[in-house]
């Protein structure tokens, strides 16, 4: 009787990730009796028994019952430890990303069919040499475009990953449309597919770079490789499904160009919509210029700091490339001053490790950063520049900034340096409160996605500087 009572007590328990824990009791024959699996991801139920005498001194698990079948399938396509090992927005983003990849795969099949038709596949009069030359010119144009675009825009895609991701997929649709239209105008065929391949190579650079930035955001356990590999597996599965559907679709639409074009427009609409929903589902906790401006404007108007979820929902995706204020961080000192007098005027009143030059006529703020400038200093410099931009805008402001706005509207351009000095004093009180509000709201202020150039400077005409 004593043994039976003891056997009813839990001896141990286990759980996988954040799944439901299950306990284990001692069976009458001395084996371990595990409780049934929970129903978090699967509909599997049933107790199983572990017998003594396993290979590791251990235990022998009843065949086919140790791991729920659906969990094995999910483990092929989801990162280990899902959902705790990834960001909360991982699942909605990946679902919509799979939808857009499926639509893009079908559209790509229609475009490839059109290109092969234009090159002369199936035409006995077509020249193999001419087709080869066309293909080589197309590929070389794309390779050159890839190199130039990566040099020109590579450093900017981290700052606006969502906007560039959306841009890449829309440009891909434009490229496929050009490929479908190319056989209709045979005189311009080579030029058309060269432009199309150039666009596709730009898509490859932008899509790959932004995918890497988003993988860094999604990976929460130093598991970027696993997240990236499982994303590749998901994309491969979707592409395989698209390939199978394309085999059924192409014979139905290949003989009717208008039907083929209609299917392409339908798939393109689905592709763009799914891309928009995928990008809108992202909740990035680091600040770029667009998100910083939204949070700062709300803080200045209402005294509250928006959280990452609210700010990401408000972030502009179509117009995010063109902010109203031109803010440049990390500019060279020689660009903003050319004389000792200008340098003295620029340094006067600056006790932070950065200098600001405000051009009101062009609505441009340039920030020179000190060698001591860290992430929080850069965040303050960006905040300072956006506050200056707010003085030229509309909307309510705190009392001390409202007075400065009236002076800006009434005063001449030459008073810009005076306004910059006085906003330093306002930020001494305002920025610590704003920074604490950012941290309390869930923003990661130790990192940022602000676009910062590599120039740093030192200056001797300023008071002792402090480091944030």
Image: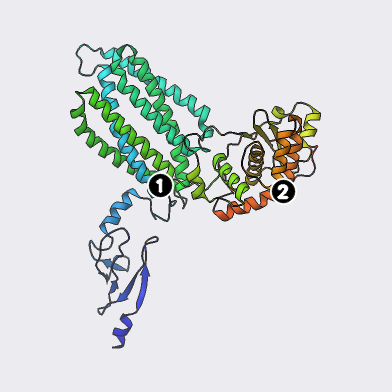
The crowd level at tag 2 (other Cα within 10 Å; few <14, some 14-19, many 20+) is few
Q: Residue 428 carries which label?
A: 2
Q: Residue at x 25, y 12 (%)?
A: 127
Horizontal side of residue 20 vs 152, given as left or right: left
Q: Residue at x 45, y 23 (%)?
A: 145
The crowd level at tag 1 (other Cα within 10 Å; few <14, some 14-19, many 20+) is many
Q: Which mark is residue 124?
A: none
Task: Pinpoint residue 188: horizontal percent, then vertical percent.
Answer: 34, 13
Q: Is residue 370 visible?
A: no
Horizontal side of residue 176 vs 222, given as left or right: left
Q: Residue at x 78, y 26 (%)?
A: 339
Q: Nearer the viewer, residue 338 or 25?
A: 338
Residue beneath disc 1: 227
- As displayed, is residue 411 above or below residue 56? above
Quadrant assignment, res 245: top left
Task: Pinpoint residue 50: horizontal percent, then vertical percent.
Answer: 27, 70
- Residue positioned most to the bottom: 1
Horizontal side of residue 352 vs 207, given as left or right: right
- Under circle 2, the secondary element is helix
Of tags 2 and 1, the one toward the viewer is 2
Task: Pinpoint residue 435: horizontal percent, then vertical percent.
Answer: 63, 51
Query: Which callout, 2 or 1, points at the residue further toward the start of the chain?
Result: 1
- Under circle 1, the secondary element is helix
Q: Distance between the residues labelled 2 and 1?
A: 42 Å
Task: Pinpoint residue 153: horizontal percent, then vertical percent.
Answer: 51, 30
């Amino acid at each position: 009787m004593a043994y039976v009572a003891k056997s009813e007590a839990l001896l141990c328990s286990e759980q996988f990730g954040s799944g439901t824990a299950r306990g284990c009791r001692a069976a009458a024959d001395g084996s371990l009796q595990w409780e049934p699996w929970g129903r978090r991801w699967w509909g599997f139920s049933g107790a199983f028994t572990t017998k003594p005498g396993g290979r590791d001194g251990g235990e022998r698990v009843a065949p086919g019952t140790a791991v729920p079948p659906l969990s094995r399938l999910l483990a092929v396509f989801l990162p280990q430890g899902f959902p705790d090992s990834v960001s909360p927005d991982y699942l909605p983003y990946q679902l919509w990303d799979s939808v857009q990849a499926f639509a893009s795969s079908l559209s790509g099949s229609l475009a490839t069919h059109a290109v092969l038709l234009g090159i002369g596949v199936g035409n006995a009069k077509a020249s193999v040499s001419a087709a080869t030359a066309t293909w080589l010119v197309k590929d070389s144009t794309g390779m050159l475009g890839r190199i130039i675009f990566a040099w020109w825009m590579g450093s900017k895609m981290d700052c606006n990953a969502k906007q560039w991701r959306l841009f890449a997929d829309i440009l891909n649709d434009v490229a496929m449309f050009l490929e479908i239209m190319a056989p209709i105008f045979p005189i311009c065929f080579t030029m058309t597919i060269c432009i199309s391949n150039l666009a596709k190579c730009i898509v490859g650079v932008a899509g790959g770079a932004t995918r890497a930035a988003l993988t860094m955001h999604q990976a929460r356990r130093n598991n970027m490789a696993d997240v990236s590999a499982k994303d590749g597996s998901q994309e491969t599965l979707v592409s395989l499904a698209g390939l199978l559907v394309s085999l059924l679709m192409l014979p139905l639409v290949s003989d009717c160009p208008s039907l083929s074009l209609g299917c392409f427009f339908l798939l393109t609409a689905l592709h763009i919509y799914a891309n928009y929903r995928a990008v809108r589902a992202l909740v990035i906790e680091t600040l770029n210029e667009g998100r910083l401006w939204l949070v700062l404007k709300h803080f200045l108007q209402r005294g509250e700091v928006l959280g990452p979820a609210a700010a990401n929902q408000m972030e502009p995706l179509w117009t995010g490339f063109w902010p109203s204020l031109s803010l440049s961080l990390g500019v060279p000192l020689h660009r903003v001053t050319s004389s000792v007098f200008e340098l003295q005027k620029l340094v006067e009143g600056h006790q932070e490790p950065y200098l600001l030059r405000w051009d009101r006529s062009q609505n441009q703020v340039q920030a020179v950063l000190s060698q001591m400038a860290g992430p929080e200093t850069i965040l303050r410099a960006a905040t300072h520049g956006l506050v200056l931009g707010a003085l030229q805008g509309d909307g309510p402001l705190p009392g001390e900034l409202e007075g400065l706005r009236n002076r800006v509207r009434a005063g001449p351009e030459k008073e810009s340096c005076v306004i910059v000095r006085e906003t330093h004093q306002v930020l001494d009180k305002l920025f610590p409160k704003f920074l604490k509000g950012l941290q309390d709201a869930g923003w990661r202020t130790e990192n940022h996605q602000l676009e910062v150039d590599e120039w740093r400077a030192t200056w001797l005409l300023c008071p002792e500087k402090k480091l944030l």
